[in-house]
Amino acid sequence: MNPAHAFETLHLRMLDVGHLRAASAVLDWDQEVNMPPAGGPARGRQLATLNAHAHALFSASETGNLINDALAARDHLGPDRQALLDEIAYDYNRAVRIPETFVRRFSEARSAAYQAWLDARRRSDFSMFLPHLDALVVLNREKAALLGYSDTPYDALLEDYERGMTSAQLKPIFDLLAQRQSALAARTSASSSAGAEPGWLGQRWDTARQWEFTEQVLRDMGFDFNAGRQDRSAHPFTTNFSIHDVRITTRLTEEDFFSALFSSIHEGGHALYEQGYREEDEGTVLASAPSLGMHESQSRLWENMIGRSLPFWNHYLPYLRKQYPGQLDRVGAEDLFREANRVRTSLIRVEADECTYNLHVILRFELETALIEGRLEAADVPGAWNEKVRQYLGLEVPDDASGCLQDIHWSHGSFGYFPTYALGNLYSAQLLATMEAAIPDLWDQVNEGVFGPCLCWLREHVHRVGRRETAVEILRDATGKEPDTDAFLEYLESKYSALYNL
Ligand SMILES: [Zn+2]
């Protein structure tokens, strides 16, 4: 085929793959948000058909031939098309290393493991999950061998979530974080200024008013409701079918003042990224994030660094007093700020505060690298887990449900996912520090409820890049630095020292 024509044909073929994947994402979203319970089995079959078609179209040898023909004429393409071609080739080369038979075995093992995990967690009985965890570790080692690696099989798995990152790079970063964050957590819990939870927090918060508040904050952040919407679901998430159709969900509970708000801001941070890609990248793989860590940096920057800041609460307190007449009369912005950042050292990762969150991630990283590298037997996971919780968090694990059975990831066969949460924290702090230097009145603006300068900066330095660069390259270009712990530890230690008089 004529090489110039090859790129165009490939591009059209990839747009079709994208349409099938987007249709599948719509069905997934509907399943979480709207679908009646009895619809499950039919929906599963519909999704399987769509996903099989998308996979077949993408991994066909014809796609490979088009890629090779287009690569032969790569020099004649402009930089955007070169970037798109390189990303398609990267995805294709990874996909074809995994044979169809392996995909089926993996997916069957995963379905069985997920069901067993649900039962095991309900009964808090690790032994029910053990044979499945064992099988998934073996399958993941096999997957790593198929994908190839130079140092450790774990790196081949990590690549799926945090491209270019290695466990050799993560290890010293995580060692330092573990040491400094467990020391900080111990100091906050020993602090006399921690105090008891104030009575006002125990009031009922009208859920319709909470909903209005979340939508107001999303609008202020710059979320485009003409190109997105918010709904309710049991577990908040973000999905998108186009730059112009980004969906987020949140959950509302009358008893919890903060839960819906922080879920909305978190997912809103993800959504602003998805709405911020370049128009000309619509429908292509360039309109996506280079890694989960970079994606998570956006949700955490908005949720933790902006949403849990004093200027944020200064701005919204008058609004909230009108929303909840009589309920916040004696509550100041400082009180809201303090409660939004209260350290509660918890056994459960998803309930963890900023001060301790990375410790949950690090212990999982240490256990899963040991499992994949064969230094730890699956049977020894509960003991090793409980020991690390004692070491990092100073807590005793009473049962496996609140210990090694709490997360869904391993039951899904996902090893290498956890580090991206901690990397998101590090990236967000590095981006924020640079943004503060570039926008000297950033916090005065937040104090007025003006988030535009912040969003503009993120659009320019992160969102619009899409997948043209890796996460590390984006960080280097935006901040002049490699991923490191300095900005995050400085942010964390100064925030909690002030809050807890350390
Ligand atoms: Zn997230």
Image (tube, helix red, strand yellow):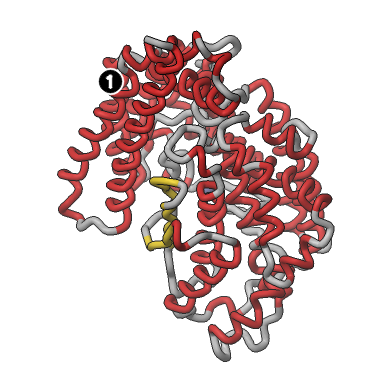
Q: Is 412 left or right of 317, judged from the image as shown?
A: left
| Residue holding disc 1 | 105
Q: Nearer the viewer, residue 243 or 231?
A: 243
For label 1, the crowd category at 10 Å Cα-Cα, with few meaning under 14, some 14 to 19 and many 20 or more, is few
Q: Residue at image x 77%, y 39%?
A: 479
Q: Residue at image x 42%, y 54%?
A: 247
Q: Position of residue 431 (x, y in %)?
A: 72, 45
Can the viewer see residue 453? yes
Q: Position of residue 382 (x, y in %)?
A: 47, 34
Note whether 298 is above or below 479 in the view shown: below
Q: Position of residue 175 (x, y in %)?
A: 71, 32
Q: How many marks?
A: 1
Q: Nearer the viewer, residue 494 or 15?
A: 15
Amino acid at dot 1: Arg
Q: Position of residue 494 (x, y in %)?
A: 81, 55
Q: Is 51 left or right of 181, judged from the image as shown?
A: left
Q: Is mark 1 within 8 Å of ligand 1?
A: no
Q: Quadrant of residue 306?
A: bottom right
| Secondary structure under the numbered disc 1 in the rendered image | helix
Q: Nearer the viewer, residue 196 or 57?
A: 57
Note whether 497 is above or below 281 in the view shown: below
User: Which quarter of the figure is the C terminus placed in?
Assistant: bottom right
Q: Residue at image x 57%, y 91%?
A: 326
Q: Residue at image x 43%, y 68%?
A: 252
Q: Is 182 left or right of 353, judged from the image as shown?
A: right
